[in-house]
Image (spheres, coloured by chain):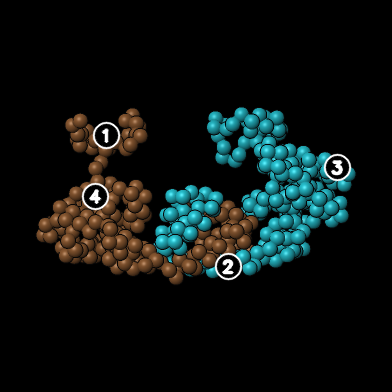
Chain colours: A cyan, B brown
Amino acid sequence: MQEIERLIQLLARLPGLGPRSARRAALHLIKKPDTLMEPLARALNEAVAAVRTCTTCGSIDTQDPCAICANPERDTKQLCIVEEVADLWAIERTGSFPGRYHVLGGRLSALDGVGPEDLNIASLVARAANDGVKEVILATNLTVDGQTTAHYITERLEPTGVTVTRLAHGVPVGGELDYLDDGTLTAAIRARRSL
Amino acid sequence: MQEIERLIQLLARLPGLGPRSARRAALHLIKKPDTLMEPLARALNEAVAAVRTCTTCGSIDTQDPCAICANPERDTKQLCIVEEVADLWAIERTGSFPGRYHVLGGRLSALDGVGPEDLNIASLVARAANDGVKEVILATNLTVDGQTTAHYITERLEPTGVTVTRLAHGVPVGGELDYLDDGTLTAAIRARRSL
């Protein structure tokens, strides 16, 4: 049973899987050795070998520079700042941003002891100063830490003279006012636009 | 990105992980190649190689017969019938059952087209008739299909003469009556015991 226990323990370390769901996942894998367990093992090994961090933007890809940084059709004048690669993927899925990205690798957090030197901020300032960047779009999360990070980056970017913008805040598309938190509603009222 | 996409697709096939949580799990793995991704790949490969189904009880283990069937200290007179290996593990965690198990590998389901020949029922009847079994404890789930399966097995075991029992139904330990469903409460009242 040692091999099964070890598999369950490792699966339980994935985000979203607790001890119980890790057991269910392990049993599911064991039931499908040829169609799921063995392919997953191979996919993990291939990912270990292939994945690297882009030295330009901090995203992950199987090439360095990553496909976005290497794509000559992406607008070099716009740089979107995100906390994590998952945020970059979320924006890419919308297909609405033509520029490039910079992945911070986290957010400033006094509580977790994350300072500016722990994030890709120095490389961001260098890019903003040199790479012909005109606009930096802050897409950090709307949490206290995310907003602190955005403030800090705005200050650090001031000497470079680039325009700094942030994502609009307001009512989500399809959102019902009655179910919205007060903070979002307040932001939406303050940022109201004339029709 | 192909390697990453493939990893996400495979992770999304695990129970409890949707497309979004599979992406989060993949990123988590990629961030920890040495401490998580590579060990998980190895654990999967080792499990593929080591895990086998017990030909006696239908459980899974790294040995056949499994550790429970091979253990001479387990009571051979009691046989507990469960639908899945996960149910066996749940009962084993309680440490309150000294006997052996028989894993059906599912439940009878007209809707899903699962008939008696798809489950380990013939081998159960053979075990009950030959192995010195005195009592068969039905621990199938309290669903319609689980109860149908229990009924069917009871009928099939009738010629063998073994005693057939089932798990008690009633108020869960720590459960509050007010939050309990009517069916459980009815079962608890019917099965009331004198103090």
Q: Which residue is mark 4?
A: B147
Quickly name the residue at label 2.
A45
Classed neighbour count for the residue bearing mark 2: other residues with Cα under 10 Å, few (<14), some (14–19), many (≥20): many
Residue B18 lies left or right of residue B149; in this view the side is: right
Q: CA distance from mark 3 to mark 2?
A: 44 Å
Using residue A55 as the reference point, say whether residue B16 is left or right of it.
Answer: left
Q: Which mark is residue B102?
A: none
Q: Position of residue B148 (x, y in %)?
A: 22, 52
Spatial separation of the CA atoms under disc 1 and disc 3: 67 Å
Q: CA distance from mark 2 to mark 1?
A: 51 Å
* Residue A136: % across, % down: 78, 47
Which residue is at 24% across, 46% downward? B167
Quadrant of the snapshot with the C terminus of chain B: top left
Q: Chain of mark 4?
A: B
Q: Is residue A79 above or below residue A177?
A: below
Q: Amino acid at mark 1?
A: Leu
- Comparing labels 3 and 2, the label whose residue is closer to the camera: 2
Residue placed most toward the observer, B19 or B165: B165
Identity of the residue drawn at 30% across and 48% down: B96
* Spatial CA span between label 2 and label 4: 44 Å
Q: Are marks 2 and 1 on the same chain?
A: no
Determine which of the numbered discs, if any, sits on residue B185 in the image: 1
Q: Which mark is residue A158?
A: 3
